Amino acid sequence: MNFMPEIASEWAGKWEWLNWYLNFWMVFFTVLIFIGVFGFAIKYRRRSEADRPKPILGSVPLEILWIVVPFLISMTMFAWGAALYYDYGSPPQNATEIYVIGKQWMFHTQHPGGQREINELHVPTGRPIKLTMSSEDVIHSFFIPAFRLKRDIVPGRYTSIWFTATKPGKYHLFCAEYCGTQHSQMGGSIYVMEPADYESWLSGGGTGSMASQGEKLFSQLGCSTCHQLTQQGRCPILSNVFGSKVELQNGSTVVADEAYVRESILTPSAKVVAGFQSIMPSYQGQISEQNILQLIAYVKSLSAPAAAPAATPSGGPAEAKEPATGPNRFQPPRETK
Amino acid sequence: MSSVPLVHEQPITPEGRTVNYLNVRHSIASWLLTVDHKRICILYLVSITFFFIIGGLAATLIRLELITPGGDLLTADGYNKAFTAHGIVMIFFFLVPSIPATLGNFLIPIMIGARDLAFPKLNLLSWYLLMIGAIVAMGALFLGGVDTGWTFYTPYSSRYSNTYVSIAIIGAFLAGFSSILTGLNFVVTVHMMRAPGMYWSRLPLFVWALYATSLIQILATPVLAITLLLVAVERSFRIGIFDPALGGDPVLFQHMFWFYSHPAVYIMILPGMGVINELVTCFSRKRIFGYEAIAVAHVALAVISFLVWGHHLFVSGQSIYAGMVFSILSFAVAIPSAVKVFNWTATMYRGSISYDTPMLYTFGFIGLFTIGGLTGLPLATLAVDVHLSDTYFVIAHFHYIMVGGMVLAYLGGLHFWWPKITGRMYPEGWGKFAALVIFVGFNLTFFPQFLLGYLGMPRRYYTYPDEFQVYHVLSSAGASILAAGFAIPVFYLLWSLRNGPMATANPWGAKGLEWEHTTSPPITENFVETPIVTEEAYHYAPEQEPEIVGA
């Protein structure tokens, strides 16, 4: 059982010290009052119905004492908290800027080099990163417990947070402001990487086969958060799809060939698979034709080794048609069909 | 107190009992058209108990759903509607009216030696407004529900939600007017109708607390009414106020909403503090420690509570300097609360403390309110709130105040004045047992939520990562104990109405006009002759001891 999330940013480290300071005083006063109340309750319990204790009117020195001392203690909390909050509100000039758009119910992030992610954010350690955020619809909130950071994303204005990550790993990203039906599904992961790993992630590798480049793109563009490989996400599983017949929302079918995959990337709402909602964003104008080809190569590679170009049309894709009812990104979905 | 006789030549009912406000008339109209503040207290008591059960059922759905990380029992929308229903019903229809409209209604005129409130018909109108508001709001909940949360944040509530938001808003609006009129009635009554000798410095502190509460109700509730109406206007007529797509400002809504809703927190706790003043003195048989300090602290809380709303907006995009001002003021508002806790503890010092049920609730209140108050400090501390805001830490914090504080005080007060209100004693053994069950169940329900908050579990989540499950299971287990604890008093209090021993005028040996100058239950006019007050409140002193009247 953990009692605190991991400490994965410089600010989180400073936050912990302040929090321990507050915890100290909270425990101190709780114990003081409990000893007072329960101690007096036992010590001065009624021993006889005839008890008539002497009245005590009060004490001005005591009143002053328990006004002034708690007030002074609380001002130390205020000062420490305000200093750290000033830090929170003042990103350094040299911070790398990453943009975040919140919409029902996902976070879009984009790196300075143009790399986009959905519900994920890859960041390097040791370098200040500033997130500039806005919303397309309602108020959301970008919350990373391991960084002890949160900021509302408000439509019609820009808000920002900044951090310097310290510890490589994968951490929760939550939406912390109630935003409607799938509020609890909005979010994903923050990946903190060593700077070198981050650079190679950014460049998408650069070497390797088309398919392996496509695989990196698949993760880099955020496709993998919804099109998961092993379990049903909010979107169809793509294994064994290529070359097969796909049933569409309007009842017709289409063969999943190169043209269909390309169309699904650029205008995803054109031919939606039966049982799914049209929630995928368009990548029109955002990726090069070469990247599309790499992605197609990757999707091809997901079909069974035997499934060469003229693959069997039947079999495989059945599970991909499972509708994502009551989705929970933390759990395999329930069998509702 | 002066020795005014309790009753002259009491009239007798056909059943052979002395006439009091309960048995003087029996028709349904005599209840629904009554202008007797004591009968209106009963009307409120019955109706808010019903609302508490509705709100409790919504809480039950929430806790059942959260036992597992996935979505099992409810749909996502169903869950969102359940927590919205819980919030709206518990806040607008239970907590805000709870102590003021029941115990306050019953006791304020009697405690100050008056025959009734200043405006008896207005008092009845307040109850009807609450009922109409409740019917409208419950209508919205049962027609299909509302999914905005009780906070109605824009632009979600004003544009994106497809639920019965406007109807729920009208319900809350009407309930708001009930609250305003009750506050107005209390303020005028306390100013104008005190008995001879009942100076301000002699008022029971319960009256001081409700006076401070009433000021907030009168000054803050209209702001809520306006704000909610603006949301309904934006929803219906697309007039841009809060929605940026129409040129509005969504954060403006938060400022206006919390300008009411933070003071409203004190509407929901000050009356509880008022009750504790009465209980801690009676069951310690001792004058309150620092009467003036507590009286001033009640009013100070009411005043400062208007200046701290911005602490709900530390991560909302408010300027960091505004945040600092609100942070200092939020620490300042903690001081009057601390003063009261210290004074209650000091009142027990060298007292003669008995462990009757109301006193058990008092111990519970002081302990849980202390924890609830102290856990407000991290939330007032700017940087720490950045992590904790909108997590379960906040949920736990305000439930320690609202349930651990207000509901325990309400139950304590209800047991304490039950003999006065009904003329019957409740079964003491069951009373103590239920108090202990509630204390244990409450802590098991809400303490794990502090830990969840530190871990980063956001509020209003229908599903959650596996690692949080153990705390949710503990919390739901606690909630089932808590529910049982709340159910027990319903049964034995109803049972006592017929079978409880008859209460004497002053079964606790307590001080105050309601105990020493009228019967249990009182006559419709409260007093045979207007009492003349000749001593301070809480005069539990040996030499003044002789009279235990009506025995």
Image (spheres, coloured by chain):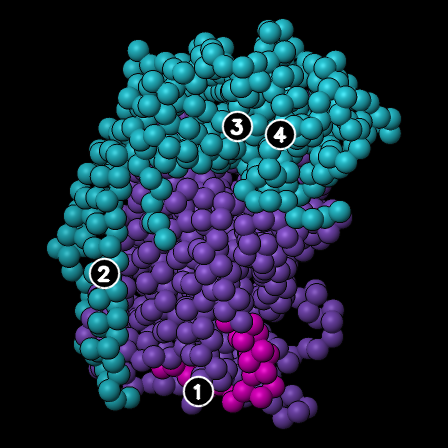
Chain colours: A cyan, B purple
Report which residue position mark 4 lands on: A227
Question: What stretch of residues is rendered in magenta?
Answer: B485-509
Q: Which residue lies at the image location 33% right of the left edge and 39% below the top edge?
A: A6
Give the foreground label among 1 and 4: 4
Give the foreground label among 2 and 1: 2
Marks 2/3: CA–CA distance: 43 Å
In this view, the residue in front, A307 or B496, is A307
User: What is the secondary structure assignment of the residue under circle 2?
Assistant: helix
Which amino acid type corresponds to the residue marked 3 in the rendered image?
Asn
Residue B318, quarter of picture:
top left
Q: Residue furthest bottom?
A: B16
Report which residue position mark 1 lands on: B550
Which amino acid type corresponds to the residue marked 1 in the rendered image?
Gly
Q: Which residue lies at the image location 54% right of the left edge and 50% below the top edge?
A: B69
Residue A105 in sight from this viewpoint: no
Report which residue position mark 2 lands on: A31
In this view, the residue in front, B303 or B204, is B303
Q: Is residue B218 left or right of residue B332?
A: right
Marks 1/4: CA–CA distance: 79 Å
